[in-house]
Amino acid sequence: MQNNVLILDFGSQYTQLIARRVRELNIFCEIKPYNRPPEDLSDYKAVILSGSPFSVRADDAPHPDLSEIKGKIPLLAICYGAQYLAHFHGGNVAPSNTREYGRARLTSIDGDEPFFYEIREDSQVWMSHSDTIKKLPENAVRLASTNDVQNAAFKIKGEITYGIQFHPEVYHTKQGKLLLENFLVHISGLQQTWTPDAFVETTVTELKQKIGSEKVILGLSGGVDSTVAAVLLHKAIGDHLHCIFVNNGLLRKNEFQEVLDQYEHMGLNVKGVDASARFLNALAGEDDPEKKRKIIGGVFIDVFDDESHKIDDAKWLAQGTIYPDVIESVSATGGPSATIKSHHNVGGLPDFMKLKVVEPLKMLFKDEVRRVGATLGIEDERLGRHPFPGPGLAIRILGDVTEEKVSILQEVDAIFINGLKEWGLYNEVWQAGAMLLPVNSVGVMGDERTYEKCVALRAVESTDGMTADWVNLPYEFLQKTSNEIINKVPGVNRVVYDISSKPPATIEWE
C-alpha cells in the first residue's frame, strides 16, 4: 500500500481545506467525488469523508457504497460523513432544535482514546450543520460532546472508523490539525514523507519515463507556476524543453521584455512571441467575462499551434496548471461542488493540435509550488511574485477590452505594485492588482470639470487563493497611491479600494 489519503468529496465548501491540512502534515492526499471513487483502493492507507450541503435525510442525499472502505481501511467521517455513518448504520439523525453553526467547546473527552491524544478538554471546534446525530449505531461508542451536541465524536467498535460532527480542517477548530495527525499518523500509521524534495525526485523520474527523448513546448507566463514547471521539466528532460513566452498584449507594463531578460539567466530555452495585436483584435467588442476567457484561451492555443510547427517533432504541451485551477474549473475533480469559473489552461486541446498534455504541478497548491521552486533553487524574487491571472488584464478591465484601456490599466497597475514594493508591503500581500471599471465619474482638475474613469485597487492575503481576506493597507499609502494615479494617468479621476473577502467575492472581478 502507498502512503496516500483518499478524500471523498460530498460537495462541502471545506473539502479543499481538508486536503490542505493533510498536506501540511507532509502526507499526500487526493480529492475524488463521492460517486466516482477509485476502483483500486490499494494506494490508500486512510479515507476521509467530507461534509456536504445535503442532509442525510433528503431523498437526493449522496449515498456512496462504502463496503470496500468501512472496516477495511482507516476511515474518518466529518460532519455529513459522520451523520451518514450513523443514519445508514442503525443510528438516528434528526433536525437540530437550533442550527449548530459556529464555535463550540469539546466536553466529556475520552482521555484514553488515541484519537484525542493531547486534545484539551474545552478545546474550541467549529460546527456547521442543521441536522444532528440523536442516536449512535449500536456498535458505536461516544468519544466527546459539546454543550449542544451530545455525539460530537464517536468510533465504531472493532474498526478504525471515527466520526466527528465538527470541522477539524478550519482555522476556528484550534487543535484540528493535531486531531488529523492523531488519526493519520498515530492511528492509521501513515508516514510523513511527502516533502518538496520527495516531490521533485518522484516527479522528475516520472517525467523522464513519460516523455523520454520527445520534445515539449511550454508556455511561460512569467509567473510562479509556469516558472517552476519549466525548471522541473528542464531538470527532467534538459534541452528537449522548448519554452515560449507569449505577449498577449494584456501583460503588466514592460513585463514582456523584463521576463525574457530574467529567463535568459536561468538557462532555459525561451522564445518570445509578440501576439498583442492578434489577441486584442479577437477581443474587440466583447464584454462578457466568460467569453473573454474563452477567446484568450482560443487565441493562446492558435499561437501555440503556429509555434509548434516551427519546432520539429514536438509531441507535448506542458502547462503550469495547479490544483485550485482544477478544483474551480471541474467542480472538485468532477464532484458535486459548484463550478466558479473556467481557467484557460485547464481542459483538453483541439484535435488538430495533436499534442499530448503534461501538467507536472496539477496536484499542488500555490504555497506547495513555491516550496518546490525553492527546492529547485529558483530565486526568492521570482517565487515571491504575486499570482497574475492567465487572461491578464482582460479580466481586470470590466467590459470590452481596447488598447487604450489596457494602456491606462498598465500605468495604474505599475504605480500600485511599485508603491507596494517601495513601502515594503509587497511581501505582506498575497495578490494585488487594479481593476478598470466600466463607469465614468465626475471630477474636478484645476478649474475644469472632468468625466473620466474609476479604478479599483485590490490587495488580499491568502495561502492558496481558495479563500482570501482583504489587506488593511495603511491610509497614508492609499492616499499617496490614489494621488499619484490621478495625477499621472490621463483618463482616471477616481480611485477606490476593494474591501471584499473571498468568499463571497472572488479575488478577480471577472
Image (cartoon, helix red, strand yellow):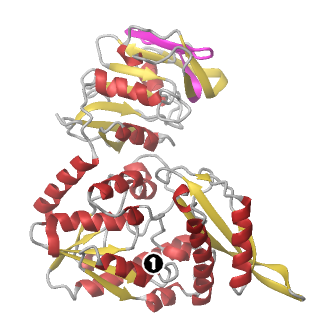
Check disc 1 and report its element: helix, strand or loop. Answer: helix
Specify whether residue 401 is in view: no
- Which one is nearer the viewer's eye here, 368 or 144? 368
The C terminus sits in image quarter:
bottom right
Span highlighted in magenta in the image: 127-149
Assess whether residue 240 is covered by the magenta stretch.
no
Residue 333 in percent (x, y) is at 37, 50
Assess whether residue 144 is covered by the magenta stretch.
yes
Classify 419 as above or below 6: below
Q: Quadrant of residue 5?
A: top left
- Which one is nearer the viewer's eye here, 443 or 341? 443
Q: Residue at x 45, y 71 (%)?
A: 390
Residue at mark 1: 296
Specify whether residue 257 is in view: yes
Residue 366 in percent (x, y) is at 41, 55
**Callout 1, which amino acid?**
Ile
Residue 64 in percent (x, y) is at 36, 33
Q: Residue at x 46, y 18 (%)?
A: 119
Residue 93 in percent (x, y) is at 53, 20
- Which one is nearer the viewer's eye here, 89 or 45? 45
